[in-house]
Amino acid sequence: MIEKVSLFLSKKDFFNFFLLCCILLCISLGLEYYNYKQLTKFDSQLVNATVLKQYTKTKYKKGKLKTYQVLKLKSDRGCTFYTTASTKLKDIKYKHITMEIWAGKVDFYDYMHSFYSFSKIIEVHPDKSYKTQLNSLINEQHKYKDISLVYQALFTAKQLPLELQKIFSSLGISHLIAISGFHLGVLSGILFFLIKYPYKFLQKRYFPYRSLKVDTFIIISISLLVYLLFLDTPPSLLRAFVMLLIGFLLYDRGLKIVSMQTLFLTIVLILVIFPRLYFSIGFWLSIAGVFYIFLFLLHYKDRSKIWQFLMLPLWLYFTMLPYSIIIFGNFSIYHPLSIIWTGLFTLFYPIGIFLHLIGYGNLLDPILSLLMHLETHTVKIVVDLKFLFIEMGLSLLALYQRIFMYLLLMYLGGFFIYAINNVT
């Protein structure tokens, strides 16, 4: 059997890769800086943007209670910003609007991350996008709005209202609702089985000289790229797509796929081309998930496939638990059951897609409704960020010594017990 080789065989290979990344990063930052200068050239600027969130906020200001609306928007050029509006403003969530914003004093760091700006809405455009039309078709198949919104989040990456986000966060299944690499993997599997046999039939008769493996991958990649662009490239999905491309290229050339080197290559390439993702929590959470999968396979690669299949969901739950609690804070007695629900979701997701395609998307509504209306008795757990850094440190050390793998497992077990004690 031919042994897989590493990507970088010499210091020269690594230097050439580093030089390429520096060039790409300079180009990416140059384009972003040009857009930044265009936005801040004058005190005010007309901007076309999509409303991502709209919610009411109340606070005391100078001894008086003030109520207003907060809008989170994403401009057509990619920057994310916040603004405020009167409580009289109607619901314009997910609408595409033209507005005048006063961003003349925004610095480049805030531009890359997110910033606040005073604004004035000029026009709310009628929404005739394909995504809106698809969401309307989904909505027609469901009696209850909340369930319709869940499917819209699953299929079109529409952001859920804060109330629903809290419910799924308490159940530990936020990662299933927000489109990520997990969904891309399921879609890849579906596409593979839909394409493989018809293509194989045609290949044998008309073009036997073609590679089934390569052509199938090209068709799947193009399909996923179209879907990625349709969804406006969510960070976690972008990471998964780039890793899919890199993984196949390495596999096709006999290089290692499941390695930290592959993950490192993916992170670097994505960040030098899309530097805004450096500030994306969703992106880093998806990277953490892949890191722990690779760490698990690194230490337990000699175990049977069945053992790996059974233990990997448990491992992922415990390793991602500190991230979930420290970042989101919601926990309930049902949270550990997300291990089971994650496994069942691999069936629920493709079945849900099929049922919506044939017009019977409401058939699974009772199951989803039961899950959404559980009495979770959610508690808010506040944990200092330093405890997450401890896990990160043990995880990095576990790459080199197995003893740190055991220490990491003990640490995660203690973290889980602490979380459970807060709800019992």
Image (cartoon, helix red, strand yellow):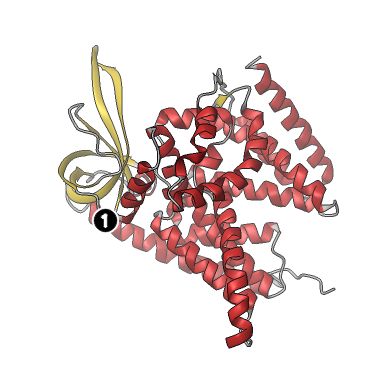
In the structure shown, which secondary structural element does the residue marked by tag 1 occupy? helix
Q: Position of residue 18 (x, y in %)?
A: 57, 67
The answer to whether residue 99 is left or right of residue 305 is left
How crowded pointer 1 is (Cα within 10 Å; few <14, some 14-19, many 20+) is rated as: some
Which quadrant holds residue 220?
bottom right
**Residue at the limit of the structure toward the left, as seen here:** 122
Q: Is residue 198 visible?
A: yes
Task: Kindly identify the residue that appears in the image at 69 percent across and 63 percent down.
Answer: 257
Image quarter of the N terminus: bottom right
The amino acid marked with disc number 1 is Lys
Q: Position of residue 325 (x, y in %)?
A: 58, 29
Q: Is residue 43 visible?
A: no
Task: Kindly identify the residue that appears in the image at 45 percent across and 53 percent down.
Answer: 357
Task: Kindly identify the residue that appears in the image at 34 percent across and 49 percent down.
Answer: 108
* Residue under numbered circle 1: 37
Q: Nearer the viewer, residue 69 or 341?
A: 341
Q: Nearer the viewer, residue 24 or 166?
A: 166
The answer to whether residue 139 is left or right of residue 192 is left
Tally of numbered discs: 1
The answer to whether residue 59 is left or right of residue 324 is left
Answer above or below: position of 57 versus 9.
above
Q: Nearer the viewer, residue 224 or 47?
A: 224
Answer above or below: position of 383 versus 53.
above
Which quadrant holds residue 60?
top left
**Residue at the limit of the structure toward the top, as seen here:** 63
Q: Position of residue 239 (x, y in %)?
A: 53, 55
